[in-house]
Image (cartoon, rainbow, N blue to C red):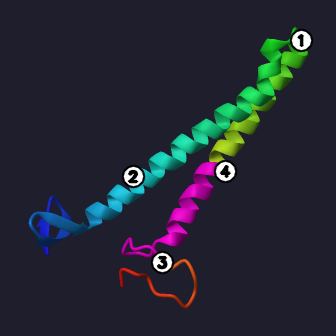
């Protein structure tokens, strides 16, 4: 193994590198997916809850309640979605970054 910039990497030939870089790339993609899907969910929920506040002529109190409720629910669902996606990712991958078999007793086809 060679060390580049403080990162251990194993060369597989023809410039391919395995190990920490692939794991970091997978984590980066999963974090991006978690954030984007959570943002979409939060925006849809906020729009569904707070949308009537702008579509219909409601009192200021009702509008404030709908907007506040939509923002709160959207923020909570955003956090829940990010945590659930990242927990699922962590459960599906072992320390080496390889996916675990989906069914107990079965081996991974790449093993």
Please state the horizontal and vertical placement of residue 18, each as a whole percent of the image. Answer: 23, 69
Q: Quadrant of the C terminus?
A: bottom left
Please state the horizontal and vertical placement of residue 91, each as a whole percent of the image. Answer: 54, 71
First reached walking from the N terminus: tag 3 or tag 4: 4
Task: Tell me the crowding category of disc 4: few under 14, some 14 to 19, or many 20 or more residues within 10 angstroms, Cα based.
Answer: few
Please state the horizontal and vertical placement of residue 110, each as a whole percent of the image. Answer: 36, 80
> What residue is at 19 percent from the left and 69 percent from the top?
8
Of the pair 18 and 7, the residue shown nearer to us: 18
Task: Tell me the crowding category of disc 3: few under 14, some 14 to 19, or many 20 or more residues within 10 angstroms, Cα based.
Answer: some
Q: Secondary structure at mark 2?
A: helix
Q: Secondary structure at mark 3?
A: loop
What is the quadrant of residue 58 in the picture?
A: top right
State yes or no: residue 88 in magenta: yes
Q: Is residue 29 visible?
A: yes
The image's mark for residue 80 is 4
Is disc 4 in contact with disc 1, using a CB cutoff of under 8 Å?
Answer: no
Q: Which residue is mark 3?
A: 100
Can you say whether 32 is above or below 60 in the image? Answer: below
The image's mark for residue 28 is 2
- Disc 2 versus disc 1: distance between alpha carbons? 43 Å
First reached walking from the N terminus: tag 2 or tag 1: 2
Q: Is residue 71 visible?
A: no
Q: Which residues are magenta?
A: 80-99
């Amino acid at each position: 193994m060679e060390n580049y910039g403080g990162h251990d990497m194993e060369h597989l030939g023809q410039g391919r590198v395995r190990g920490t870089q692939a794991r970091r790339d997978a984590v980066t993609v999963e974090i991006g997916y978690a954030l984007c899907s959570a943002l979409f969910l939060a925006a849809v929920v906020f729009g569904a809850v707070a949308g009537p506040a702008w579509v219909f002529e409601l009192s200021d109190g009702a509008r404030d309640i709908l907007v506040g409720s939509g923002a709160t629910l959207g923020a909570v669902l955003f956090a829940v979605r990010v945590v659930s996606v990242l927990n699922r990712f962590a459960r599906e991958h072992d320390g080496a970054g390889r996916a675990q078999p989906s069914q107990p007793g079965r081996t991974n086809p790449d093993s």
